[in-house]
Amino acid sequence: MLPVPPHIRTGVILTPELRFAWDEWNIRDPYMFVQAAIFEALEPLTNKACTALTIAIGEWICARFAPLDPDPIPLQFLEAAWAGVIHPAYCEYFETTDDEWRGPVRAPLAITVTIAADALFRLDADPIVAHRTCWMRNLARHVIDPHNRFDAWFAACVARLAQHHNKQKDPSIATASIFEDFPGQGLPVPREAFDLAVAYDATDAPQLLDRYLRSLDPRANPFLRSTEELSEVDGLPGPPYRYEP
């Protein structure tokens, strides 16, 4: 299971008290919109950078509801989604069912999983992952109180990604094949990039990604595909659960 990063542990007030409104018949309004200024800041980032940021925001939401719901599924899915940033084949697609995910705790967790899955698997419907990043940010700001530490973290992450995972600088975009289904996604971004207390450079990403894959146990997470399944997948950046680009 994903450990809670230090920046989330200190940034989220773990309380059973819910201070936000939740309308079960209108669940999209709190998150499904795009602020022009936020999208403008995200648009220069690679799709892979936006996908990673979307998942990183999802961890804030899971931490916020940790005292209220022990279900491991949301964090298990995000753990697999981090591997999915490296290659979507690592992560099993998952859809929640409405009857099991209702109310002001379960529904936001379901939306968190849905947005992350959308960023990984629904590029055919919308190839711009930054839209999903905006949605996840909106959801986090709706359910997390107060916002000040989250907002500061988000802004700093966008600045870091703009420096290291910008479309104009990513070498994989310049060499992307026109025959790829979704060319120009960019290089994978490791989870460690979102710990602002630690220095980060994109040249460290391969080592960090490899370390993350080697730490995973598909037997303990139903959303991680087995080594045997992955051995049949073309295009993995190395053997299953290794990153060797």
Image: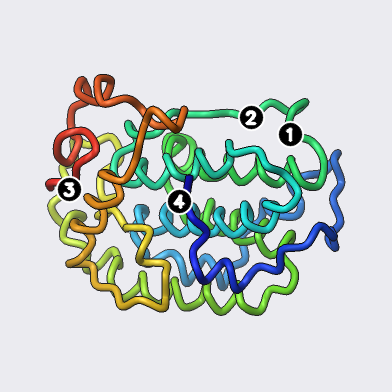
Do the residues bearing badges 1 and 2 touch, measured as CB atoms within 8 Å?
yes
Earlier sequence position, callout 4 versus callout 3: 4
Task: Quickly name the residue at label 4.
Answer: 129
Tag 4: residue type?
Val
Q: Residue at x 87, y 46 (%)?
A: 23
Instruction: Give the residue displayed 86% in from the left and 56% down from the top.
Output: 21
Left or right of residue 180: residue 110:
right
- Of badges 4 and 1, nearer the viewer stands 1
- Mark 1: amino acid: Trp
The residue pinned by badge 1 equals 101
Q: Secondary structure at mark 2?
A: loop
Q: Amino acid at mark 2?
A: Thr
| Mark 3 / mark 2, whichever is N-terminal | 2
Q: Amino acid at mark 3?
A: Ala
- Tag 4 secondary structure: loop
* Circle 2 residues within 10 Å: few <14, some 14–19, many ≥20: few
Q: x, y percentage for residue 174?
A: 16, 57
- The residue tagged 3 is 176
* Residue at 37%, 53% in the rendered image: 47
Q: Earlier in the sequence, mark 1 or mark 3?
A: 1
